[in-house]
Amino acid sequence: MSKPVKISGVIITFNEERNIERCLTSLKEVCDEIVVVDSFSTDGTKAICQAHQVRFVENTFEGHIEQKNFAMAQATNDIVLSLDADEALSPKLQESILAVKQNWQQPAYRFNRFTNYCGQWIKHSGWYPDTKTRLWDRRNGKWGGTNPHDSVELSSNIEAKHLKGDLLHYSYYTMEEHVLRSAKYAKISAKALYKQGKKASLLKMIGSAGFRFVQDYFLRGGIRDGFYGLVICGTSSHTTFLKYAYLRNLNNGKAIEE
């Protein structure tokens, strides 16, 4: 039987002063509480969150998946809406969430994520629709995947229903940010793969990077996103190359610098 529910908005943060207020403002329209779990930010993140009267919890960061599951556990409601600090709900998505909030029928809901890159909304390049499950009953799922690419893993036989509206993702303000963070994520991914016992050959490094570029730029329409489409697809290909290069170093007993 359907019924109204209460929703807990959940966010993890670290030095997100330029993004967090936009995220909090959009969540206030649909959530009964907002929980922010911060890994000891050194900028104005904490002050902004306290000004919005959210529940602010500090916790040592041990990985994206671990931190998000910890944050989910802090919620007082079983229905959780999890966003990254650089994301916000579009007005249409707010409407959709408010509707299901009053008539909760599914264990989980998903929606498209629309990314802004250096001021341009990216409609292709493998970045859209980029559907994400972010609204669910925590008794039926938790965060999983491989760091830093976390995703919600639902219990068996449960499917998320799609909602109208976009999750707006304000990803990178400059190309330099993208390149630097991509290298960081490549290291995290390589370490996760190494722990799983994965190997990386030279052919894997080159072939995976080449396939990634062809897939994103041509098959997924990155060419239609103009200059930034080329930058995005080229950087994604380079990140794939770096991931396996770092993994190969680890396979050969060489440490990766942080």
Image: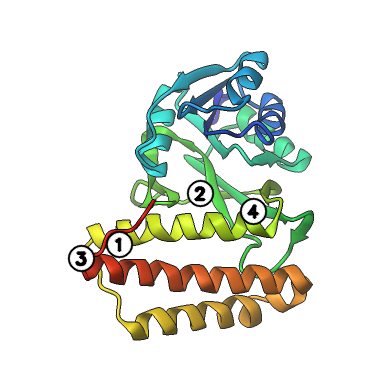
In the rendered view, would you say 170 is above or below 121?
Answer: above
Mark 3 or 2: in front is 3
Instruction: Please tell me which residue is depicted at 67% across the width and 33% down the height of the picture.
Output: 23
Q: Earlier in the sequence, mark 1 or mark 4?
A: 4
Q: Give the labeled residue for mark 2.
A: 160
Q: Nearer the viewer, mark 4 or mark 3?
A: 3
- Whichever of labels 4 and 3 marks the residue nearer the N terminus, that label is 4
Residue type at mark 4? Asn
Q: Which mark is residue 253?
A: 3
Secondary structure beneath label 1 = helix
Instruction: Find residue 201 and report its image quarter.
Output: bottom left
Residue ID for mark 1: 193
Residue 16 rendering spot, x and y as whole percentages: 61, 34
Question: Residue type at mark 1?
Answer: Leu
Secondary structure of the residue carrying numbered label 3: loop
2 lies left or right of 118: left
User: How packed is label 2: few (under 14 Cα within 10 Å), some, or many (20 or more)?
Assistant: some
